[in-house]
Image: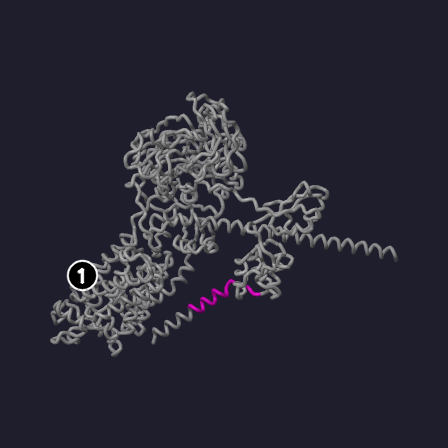
């Protein structure tokens, strides 16, 4: 094993309770809610009208802008409404397409395609049409991420199966049960970026998944499997690149800038289904776990299914349910209601009992113990950032690398003074990023101003020269 | 005795170090000073300071021909930063040099009224207006610094200052990437 | 019918470390040394600790009240108790009561709360308190008892004698100071050298055992055990203690090699005076020390070096307190130059 993640934590993974039972399909509800902005970037635009009949897999919204994604109907039925609905990932309601399920699952005709005969551009365009976005949680549309890697000549595809966050086991179950999909998706993605190398990175605590992947590879060595220590946050994109390849993504840049494309294993499996079965991204695997639910398990659920329905599928709430979290316990979003729909980002739902989570103690002043710096995977000094964030000292925050914080929560976790550092940094990033924007605007305006001044000087110079030439001509003629 | 000497020596070394630190990033010469002053200016190029742009204003400050309180777009923060760099007493921006609107603004041309005279194009200090003679002009909002220099030359008074288009209104996308 | 839940932000769970736990474990780690102290020097230290802790808690409560801070929360964090215990461990066991009371009160009020209380004090409060006493009342701080070990202490001091001495500042009528006190190893070497004796002649005194002073070596074993458990529990990191011991022992070894007749060897320095107390319990105070690991190495090495310089050529027999304070002073500078390279940034 090559260089390790810097800092990080060994956490109680709590994964076993959701991997005891096999993956199964969730029941499909009567009404599905599909927010138009459930991916990173610009919201999609609806291409159906309320009342229109739709088929399973039929496109219902198209991308708008450079970074956006298609959206497909997860069931057959009728568009009940296009209206703002409550969503898990933002506070205000998001414009959503609501579909009334007719229960027939009538499919939209979409032929399978053979990726081997396709060019890079064709592959990427087809991936985009499948509505494929990053399923690790960030939901960055896959196609623009692939296209961006064109800047580097030597390209490497890194599949992220290092599910470092506690509780989440959806990628583990996917690799155990559908390793073939992951491998096929990896080959398609690799061809789509013309990568020379492809590596699947997993953590060392999922031996069954590793065995399944090796079996699916069947002694072919075109894809390497890299086993990493299970340290949180080894599965962070930047941390994984360092751990697997010993390289760092430049600050403010993207992995694609150094020729690396990281995709979640779930994304690869979704690509495989889209190419092989003609089924776009209309469902995903989600871990339903925590002591607040009766039977923790992994479900394959249609997008737009209300979280309450998923919990009902798992035997319903246990007595102790106290808190609802979408994602892991370190970076997940706290949900206030179970009526919210499953979206492309929902990799896990924790129905937490009090015993599952250690609550925060009373906040004390920072005692400069430095534990936070020790665990920071970006090698930041959280205690210094804490002082400057309190003082709103934007210059110092920028210099100390606030924008390089990946919000993993490690510093919070170890802080003996129980300071909510991550939340403080999230808030501090807002003015700091507008400061960054102001600085880049100013330097652009300055460049334009200086270019204009140069041009004006040059024109003046040319006019003078022309005048001079005319004058010489005139005097020459006189003599 | 020895402790006293030691402490004195340590203090002397520390103060020497501090002085060196303080001196180290400074370059001498007017050009370098102009550069550093210009870095602190907002690059609006609006001439409210009475000079022909941010760099000319920076040059004037460096030569002692202008005060540090003449930049309304930079506001108090810039006035303080300029004074700080020159180790002068900070002074509030003098309202005689203009008052900024409460929100960031950009110029917008009423395209129905524009007669295509190109006067505003010539006035724009950052080449943010496009259009040809006798053709309608338009402002590239992303490049407009809100300097208002295009308004007076317009013969038909078709340019208006409007709030700058805000960035994307949605919250940052879910950040949970360490799955 | 839908269930609603409280809003929360990530991370939703935290570790179990708390300021109070850190301070509590540091106090526990001092216990072996305190017990050995009682065995070697009698029950004086216990009374000193009781006096110190009471003073610390009262002044802390007073300061918190004046600063309008939550008294209960901060009184329970244990930091004031550590300050008091550390000062008590630096004082001679029979020092008069007003010494520990004034030193602790000064440490808590001036060195800690005037700078903003827990987490905001640039100097180690215990060392400020001790240094003030050392500068103001040097005579009282040299009256160390002869260790009650290997027949060095001729008098069997009862608890009543100790109580009487500490509270009246006078020995009971039957006792005399020069009968029951003996110089500390560092003092013995210093005065011996000053009188023109060689190091070997000075060390030949019966107060010295195989490793430095008799009795002192046991207390140092206790400190070492406590320090090791703090390391094992990850309450402190190895950087500061190791760097401090290296900063002290490397120059000691060098000078010893140059002139063994004048300069004691590194092992002597390891167990003499406050070396181990300083390395594991004082220099590791997070609030007043450097933050990054590299910074901790520099900070610790500086303390060790300054301690050696003061011991070898300075005006005081021991220099840990002054060395710590001097390096506290340099912490902002050290921190400034030891910012780690951020992921994805060029250095």
- C133 in relation to C121, above or below: below
- C339 in relation to A35, above or below: below
Q: Chain of mark 1?
A: C
> What residue would you read off at disc 1?
C35
- Residue A210 in view in this figure: no
Residue A281: x percent and y percent? 45, 30
Return the residue nearer the eye: C114 or B100: B100
Task: Report the magenta stretch's main SS.
Answer: helix
In the image, the segment drawn in magenta is B14-28
Q: Residue A305 sits in which quadrant?
A: top left
Please give left or right for residue A311 compared with residue A464 in the image: left
Residue A269: x percent and y percent? 42, 31
Q: Within 10 Å of the Cα at label 1, are there few (<14), some (14-19), or many (20+) other Cα atoms?
A: some
**Which color scheme did the rendering employ for the protein?**
one colour
Return the residue nearer the eye: C84 or C267: C84
Return the residue nearer the eye: A284 or C101: C101
Asked if the magenta segment contains residue B20, the reply would be: yes
Return the residue nearer the eye: A302 or C113: C113
- B131 in relation to C123, above or below: above
Residue C139: x percent and y percent? 24, 75
Secondary structure of the residue carrying tag 1 is: helix
- Residue C32 in view in this figure: yes
- B73 in relation to A244, above or below: below
Residue B98: x percent and y percent? 60, 57
The C terminus of chain A appears in which quarter of the rendering? bottom right
The N terminus of chain A appears in which quarter of the rendering? top left
Please give left or right for residue A29 compared with residue A55 in the image: left
Q: Residue A472 sits in which quadrant?
A: bottom right
Asked if the magenta segment contains residue A85, the reply would be: no
């Amino acid at each position: 094993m090559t260089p390790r993640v810097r800092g990080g934590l060994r956490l109680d993974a709590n994964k076993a309770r959701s991997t005891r039972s096999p993956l199964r399909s969730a029941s499909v509800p009567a009404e599905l809610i599909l927010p138009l902005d459930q991916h990173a970037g610009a919201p999609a635009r609806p291409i159906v009208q309320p009342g229109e009949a739709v088929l399973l897999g039929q496109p219902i919204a198209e991308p708008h802008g450079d970074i956006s994604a298609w959206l497909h109907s997860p069931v057959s039925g009728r568009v009940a409404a296009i209206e703002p609905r409550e969503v898990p990932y933002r506070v205000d309601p998001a414009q959503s397409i609501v579909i009334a399920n007719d229960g027939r699952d009538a499919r939209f005709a979409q032929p399978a395609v053979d990726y081997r005969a396709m060019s890079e551009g064709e592959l990427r365009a087809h991936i985009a049409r499948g509505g494929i976005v990053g399923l690790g949680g960030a939901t960055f549309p896959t196609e623009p991420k692939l296209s961006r890697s064109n800047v580097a000549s030597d390209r490497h595809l890194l599949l992220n199966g290092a599910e470092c966050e506690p509780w989440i086991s959806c990628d583990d179950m996917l690799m155990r049960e559908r390793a073939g999909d992951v491998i096929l998706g990896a080959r398609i993605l690799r061809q789509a970026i013309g990568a020379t190398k492809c590596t699947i990175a997993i953590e060392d605590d999922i031996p069954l998944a590793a065995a399944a992947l090796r079996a699916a590879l069947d002694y072919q060595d075109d894809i390497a499997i890299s086993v990493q220590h299970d340290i949180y946050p080894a599965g962070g994109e930047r941390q994984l690149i360092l751990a697997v390849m010993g390289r760092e993504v430049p600050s403010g840049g993207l992995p694609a800038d150094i020729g690396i494309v990281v995709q979640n294993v779930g994304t690869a499996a979704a690509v495989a289904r889209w190419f092989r079965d003609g089924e776009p991204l209309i469902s995903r695997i989600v871990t339903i776990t925590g002591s607040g639910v009766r039977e923790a398990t992994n479900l394959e659920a249609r997008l737009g299914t209300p979280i309450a329905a998923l919990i009902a599928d798992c035997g319903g709430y246990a007595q102790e349910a106290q808190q609802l979290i979408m994602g892991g316990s370190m970076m997940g979003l706290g949900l206030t209601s179970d009526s919210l729909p499953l979206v492309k980002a929902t990799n896990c739902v924790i129905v937490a009992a009090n015993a599952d989570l250690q609550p925060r103690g009373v906040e004390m002043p920072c005692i400069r113990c430095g534990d936070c710096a020790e665990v920071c995977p970006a090698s930041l000094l959280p205690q210094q950032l804490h002082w400057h964030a309190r003082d709103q000292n934007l210059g110092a925050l920028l210099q100390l690398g606030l924008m390089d914080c990946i919000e993993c929560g490690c510093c919070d976790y170890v802080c003996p003074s129980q300071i909510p550092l991550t939340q403080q940094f999230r808030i501090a990033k807002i003015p700091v990023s507008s400061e960054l924007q102001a600085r880049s605007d100013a330097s652009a305006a300055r460049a334009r101003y200086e270019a204009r001044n140069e041009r004006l000087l040059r024109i003046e110079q040319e006019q003078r020269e022309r005048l001079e030439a005319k004058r010489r001509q005139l005097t020459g003629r006189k003599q | 005795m020895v402790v006293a000497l030691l402490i004195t020596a340590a203090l002397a070394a520390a103060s020497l170090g501090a002085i060196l630190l303080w001196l180290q990033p400074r370059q001498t010469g007017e050009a370098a000073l102009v550069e550093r002053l210009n870095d602190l200016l907002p690059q609006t190029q609006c001439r409210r300071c009475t000079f022909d742009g941010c760099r000319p204003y920076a040059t004037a400050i460096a030569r002692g021909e202008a005060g540090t309180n003449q930049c309304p777009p930079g506001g108090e923060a810039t006035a303080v930063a300029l004074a700080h760099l020159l180790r002068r007493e900070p002074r509030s921006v003098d309202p005689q040099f203009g008052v900024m609107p409460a929100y960031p603004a950009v110029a917008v041309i009423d395209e129905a009224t524009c007669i295509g005279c190109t006067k505003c194009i010539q006035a724009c200090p950052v080449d943010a207006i496009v259009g040809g003679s006798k053709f309608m002009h338009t402002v590239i909002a992303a490049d407009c610094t809100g300097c208002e220099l295009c308004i007076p030359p317009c013969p038909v008074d078709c340019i208006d200052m409007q709030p700058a288009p805000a960035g994307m209104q949605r919250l940052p996308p879910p950040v949970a990437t360490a799955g | 019918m839908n269930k609603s839940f409280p809003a929360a932000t990530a991370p939703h769970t935290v570790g179990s470390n708390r300021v109070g736990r850190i301070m509590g474990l540091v106090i526990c780690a001092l216990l072996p040394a305190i017990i050995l102290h009682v065995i070697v020097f009698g029950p004086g230290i216990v009374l000193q600790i009781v006096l110190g802790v009471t003073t610390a808690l009262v002044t802390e409560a007073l300061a918190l009240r004046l600063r309008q801070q939550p008294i209960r929360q901060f009184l329970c964090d244990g930091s004031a108790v550590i300050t008091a215990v550390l000062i008590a461990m630096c004082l001679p066991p029979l020092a008069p009561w007003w010494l520990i009371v004034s030193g602790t009160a000064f440490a808590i009020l001036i060195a800690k709360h005037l700078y903003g209380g827990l987490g905001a004090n640039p100097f180690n409060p215990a060392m400020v308190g001790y240094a003030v006493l050392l500068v103001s009342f040097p005579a009282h701080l040299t009256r160390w008892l002869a260790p009650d070990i290997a027949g060095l202490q001729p008098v069997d001091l009862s608890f009543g004698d100790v109580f009487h001495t500490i509270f009246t500042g006078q020995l009971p009528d039957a006792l005399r100071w020069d009968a029951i006190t003996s110089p500390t190893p560092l003092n013995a070497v210093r005065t011996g050298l000053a009188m023109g004796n060689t190091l070997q002649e000075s060390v030949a005194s019966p107060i010295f055992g195989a490793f430095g002073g008799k009795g002192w070596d046991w207390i140092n074993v206790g400190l070492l055990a406590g320090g090791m458990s703090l390391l094992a529990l990850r309450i402190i990191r190895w950087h500061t203690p190791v760097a401090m011991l290296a900063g002290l022992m490397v120059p000691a070894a060098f000078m010893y090699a140059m002139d063994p007749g004048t300069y004691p060897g590194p092992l002597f320095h390891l167990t003499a005076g406050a070396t181990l107390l300083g390395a594991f319990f004082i220099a590791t105070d997070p609030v007043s020390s450097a933050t990054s690991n590299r910074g901790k190495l520099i900070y610790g090495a500086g303390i060790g070096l300054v301690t050696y310089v003061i011991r070898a050529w300075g005006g005081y027999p021991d220099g840990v307190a002054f060395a710590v304070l001097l390096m506290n002073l340099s912490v902002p500078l050290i921190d400034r130059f030891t910012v780690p390279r951020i992921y994805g940034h060029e250095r």
